[in-house]
Image (tube, rainbow, N blue to C red):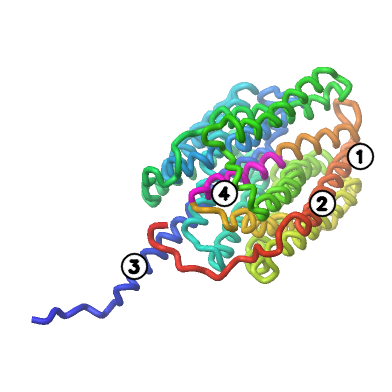
Amino acid sequence: MRTVRDTSTPPTSIGERAIRRRERVVLVLACVVSFVVVLDATIVSVALPDIRVDLGYSPAALPWVVNAYTLAFAGFLLLGGRCCDVYGPRRSLAVGMALFTAAGLVCALATSPAMLSAARAAQGLGAALSMPTTLSVLTATFAEGPRRAGVLGTWSAVGGIAATAGPVLGGVLTQWLGWRWVFLVNVPLGIGAVAVGLAVLAPHRRGSGGPGRLDVVGALVATSGLVAVVFAVMRSEAVGWASSSVWAVLTVGVLLLGLFPVHQARWAADPLLPPGLFRLRSVRGANVVMFLVALGFVATLIILSFHMQYVRGYTPLRAGCGFLPIGLGMMVGARTAGSLSLRLGPRRAVSAYCALGAVGLIALAASATAAAHGSYWWAVAVPGMLFGLGTAAAFTPITLAATAGVPPARGGVAAGLLNTVRQVGGAVGLAVLSTIASAVTGAGRTPAPHALADGYAAALAVAAGCVAGASVMALVAMPRNTRPTAARAPTSDT
């Protein structure tokens, strides 16, 4: 008897639907993790004045509420990327987001500056374990080509939205519920991400990520060097560059950072940065450009928050809402960046977007001295929108270039490297630009608004120079042949 096959649903469509459904869930998961990690770096910006009053932070120590998170994040991202390769995205995400969420709860319950700063550092470590999994699972799930470009555009858009939603949401929570809620808001999202990740991501196949050894010593050397350099820069604000203590700490930091590549090349059995990764010009060039963009990006958001509260006299809620046009620009830029990157290629797209971001920063710097008497729309909203559109859009083609041609087994470490450079640039930029702003403002415990405005204008001008430098460096350092190739059909096990 002949078997009759049910042809009402083609056999291939069932598998394709399952693949598409899993792809959507993976994209949502990656975006949620990216959202909470980026949000946590900026949501405290508007709450900093209230945190300073309640916990007794000194003015010099207050930036560590941001930098304790950023430096731990940056310093351990390479280790997090390697953990992703060795243990798999599923385990890395679960452990990282669990630590991130628990540390966020401790932040909300903090009773002293030391407790809050330590918990913020623990959050940064959790973020470092989690963030590389987002880019790793996306590049493994979506093949190079238009689909990957679109997905990375969505992922970048979420990061841009989170960066600007942080000050807005932080202003609302700080004014209505108190600053502790800026840490509590991420707790349910973190718990949900852990649950979905365990349910959706496949267990790691033993041996698929290469040798199962982690270079913890290398991670500690890199992190210690970064902390020392940033601490020295921030310390110079209080005691001046003539202080021997500043130069001693700075020297130690530079030596440790110089020791890191030597350790990777000679002593590390399984280095965090495989030398072969830097043979790809697209990887080298994209990371240099990312560093320059990041120097001005994070610091600009913090400086604008201070400008609106200390110079314009805005409440936390109003200052947070003042970031909405910037967030709109970031969202539009990130969502349209994928298609332009396909038409122009990442190299020219990065250069064009960075040039646009630099124009916005120049306008912000020029209008900052208008203080409270200038129009918000022309002094902040319009130039801020240009800044947000250009910088957020640049992240997509930079990411495309940084991951082009990277073997799947090294996807986690490539993602960790790119995010490390972004966070290091943000931490160094915040330290340097804050120091510049303080130096221009001058001495005094309560500087006049016009003096603060001059300091913020100088810092924004330096940020504009960094982003303009990224525009030029993209043409110099990034190769011409990084245009994404035609899409390949993804397999069900990626």
Q: Which amino acid does label 3 sit on?
A: Gly
**Marks 4, 2: nearer the viewer:** 2
Q: Nearer the viewer, residue 308 or 213?
A: 213
284 in relation to 440, above or below: below
The tag earlier along the polypeptide, 3 or 4, is: 3
Q: How far apart are marks 4 and 1 (CA)?
A: 35 Å
Magenta span: chief secondary structure: helix
The tag earlier along the polypeptide, 4 or 2, is: 4
The reply to whether dot 4 and dot 2 touch (C-beta < 8 Å) is: no
Residue underneath mark 4: 35
The reply to whether dot 2 and dot 3 touch (C-beta < 8 Å) is: no
Q: Nearer the viewer, residue 274 or 389?
A: 274
Q: How many marks?
A: 4
Place of residue 376 in the rendered image (x, y in percent of width and height, measured from the top left): 82, 53
**Marks 3, 4: nearer the viewer:** 3
Q: Which amino acid does label 2 sit on?
A: Gly
Q: Is mark 4 on a helix, strand or loop?
A: helix
* Image-based side of 308 in relation to 447, left or right: left
Residue underneath mark 2: 469
267 in relation to 302, above or below: above
Magenta range is 409-426
Place of residue 331 in the rendered image (x, y in percent of width and height, measured from the top left): 65, 59
Q: What element carries label 2?
A: helix
The tag earlier along the polypeptide, 1 or 3, is: 3
